[in-house]
Image (spheres, rainbow, N blue to C red):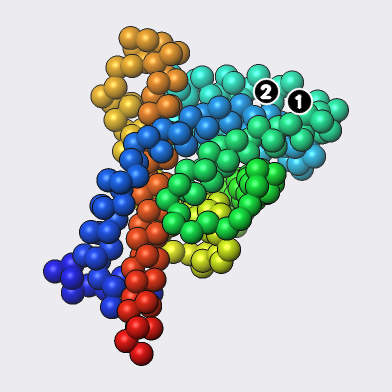
Amino acid sequence: MLKAISVPGAKNISFYDVTALFVEQVNEEGLNVRAGAISFNLLIAVPACLLFLCTLLPYITSSKLFYFELQNMILHFTPNIGARQLMLKFLEEIFSKTKNGMLSLGFILAIFYSSNAMMGIIRTFDRSLKEKAKTNFIKKRLRAMKLTMILFMLFIGTLIISMGQGMLFQRIMQVLSIHNLKVQLLIKSLRWFVIAALFLFSTCFIYKYAPTLDKRKKLFSLGAIIATCLLIFSTTLFSFWAQNFSNYSKFYGTIGSILVMMMLIFVNSFVLLIGYELDLSIEELKRRQHSIEVKTN
């Protein structure tokens, strides 16, 4: 059945061929080890990312609303109560000590250390490439910092849009006199489309610009779309498991909450690699198909 279904945007390439090559590449590359490398770099970059947001806070209008929206996002995406309290406490400590003077050397250092996560992704992605563009450490670091800045801007933009949506929808409901709770809930749930768009665009930017390639592929890809769906699904499922079945926080307290957060980051790193390897499999099959066509002609 899979042999009869073609991959969108790739003629004469079936899902069966893509799946077979994907499994072959995954077995060769060792996805677990690479996902572990990405998750480690992501974990150590979290404090630097929050410090970076901390330095920007005084320059963002309605910074209190921004802070509350960030809190709201943590409430929805942290896997359990322990991890939630840990993140909220950490966030409160950082944001309560915000100083305008940090926007200098500290600002640059925050970007530098935040980009360690992206550097880990770049190195891991490059290991799967058969042909890489010539580059050096400085160019890689600058690319990692640029990508980190883009993702920060996407994240901040999403929070601002989410804040604006909340106020706009509240105003619309008042003007139109909408008092039905189901209708209000439906309107408020539209903000999740914005968050899903953040996931999608972030994944697309990483897949396009992180690998060291001479020729960049299209922004949107099948792997990025599948990875985005899996990221949302895995985060939701993992949060449900952590809140209802996991006993790490009960037995180990704060350490248990950190363990749960580390597991969530590892799962999402694994998913990120799955989408990337899927795109590589499609590109490799396209290259093979093109070679056959050239030889035939």
Q: Quadrant of the N terminus?
A: bottom left
Residue in front for this viewpoint, 36 or 257: 36
Work out whether 109 lies above or below 201. above
Residue in front for this viewpoint, 228 or 136: 136
Q: Image quarter for residue 30?
A: top left
Q: Are the residues tagged 2 and 1 within 8 Å (C-beta)?
A: yes
Which residue is under mark 1? 98
Question: Looking at numbered disc 2 in the image, what kind of residue is underneath it?
Answer: Ile
Q: Is residue 260 left or right of residue 41?
A: left
Work out whether 76 lies above or below 94. below
Graded by Cα atoms within 10 Å as few (under 14), some (14 to 19) or many (20 or more), the crowding at tag 1 reads: some
Work out whether 104 lies above or below 154. above
Residue at the extreme front of the image, as rendered: 295
Q: Quadrant of the C terminus?
A: bottom left
**Gap in Å between the C-alphas at discs 2 and 1?**
7 Å
Q: Residue at x 44, y 56 (%)?
A: 130
Give the x, y percent position of residue 198: 53, 52
Residue in front for this viewpoint, 117 or 100: 117
Give the x, y percent position of residue 261: 43, 27
Which residue is under mark 2? 94
Label 2 sits on a secondary structure element that is helix
